[in-house]
Image (cartoon, rainbow, N blue to C red):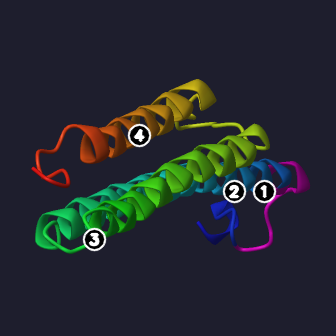
């Protein structure tokens, strides 16, 4: 039984090479999944920055001068745009160097679509904050 164990050091050289390749493939699969989790974390952080921007505008919307709350909210939302863009770029660069073996590797275009959707929504929100709200000066 012990002689059948590939981890006991007595395995044949060919079996040992196959085991090393399997371990490398599994490590690469784990890294692919880690890149996906990291991308999701960056996108969650982008949504958090959007929420902080909206919350700031909601809490301090009556601050004088009128544009201060909007400017600070816009800074947080622009930060969300930057986070989403950087997340897509970093994930794409990392995934270019890897291939999935037992897991499906996410396609770079799909990650870009997610990031660009977050960017488009955030920029639309900035437009809404500045141009569609009713508390304009003199109003």
Residue 44 point in image, percent of width and height:
36, 57
Q: Is residue 136 left or right of residue 23?
A: left
The relative height of residue 125 versus residue 48 in the rendered view (above or below) is: above
Residue 120 point in image, percent of width and height:
42, 33
Q: Secondary structure at mark 1?
A: helix
The residue positioned 74% from the left and 54% from the top of the image is: 24
The relative height of residue 110 versus residue 73 in the rendered view (above or below) is: above
Residue 20: image tag: 1
Q: Quadrant of residue 127?
A: top left
The residue positioned 79% from the left and 73% from the top of the image is: 9
Label 3 near label 4: C-beta < 8 Å?
Answer: no
Residue 112 point in image, percent of width and height:
55, 32
Residue 23: image tag: 2
The relative height of residue 15 versus residue 73 in the rendered view (above or below) is: above
Q: Quadrant of residue 109?
A: top right
Q: Which residue is mark 3?
A: 65
Q: Is residue 56 left or right of residue 112?
A: left
Q: Earlier in the sequence, mark 1 or mark 3?
A: 1
Label 1 near label 4: C-beta < 8 Å?
Answer: no
Q: Earlier in the sequence, mark 4 or mark 3?
A: 3
Q: Which residue is mark 4?
A: 123
Q: Closer to us: mark 2 or mark 4?
A: 4
Q: Nearer the viewer, residue 11 or 57?
A: 57
């Amino acid at each position: 039984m012990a002689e059948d164990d590939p981890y006991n050091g007595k395995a044949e050289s060919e079996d040992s090479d196959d085991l090393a390749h399997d371990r490398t493939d599994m490590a690469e699969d784990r890294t692919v999944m880690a890149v996906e989790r990291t991308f999701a974390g960056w996108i969650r952080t982008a949504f958090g920055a959007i929420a902080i921007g909206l919350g700031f505008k909601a809490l301090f919307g009556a601050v004088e001068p009128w544009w201060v709350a909007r400017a600070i909210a816009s800074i947080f939302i622009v930060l969300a745009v930057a986070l989403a863009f950087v997340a897509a770029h970093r994930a794409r660069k990392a995934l270019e160097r890897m291939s999935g073996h037992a897991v499906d590797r996410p396609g770079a275009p799909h990650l870009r679509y997610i990031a660009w959707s977050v960017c488009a929504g955030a920029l639309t929100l900035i437009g809404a904050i500045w141009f569609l709200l009713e508390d304009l000066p003199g109003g």
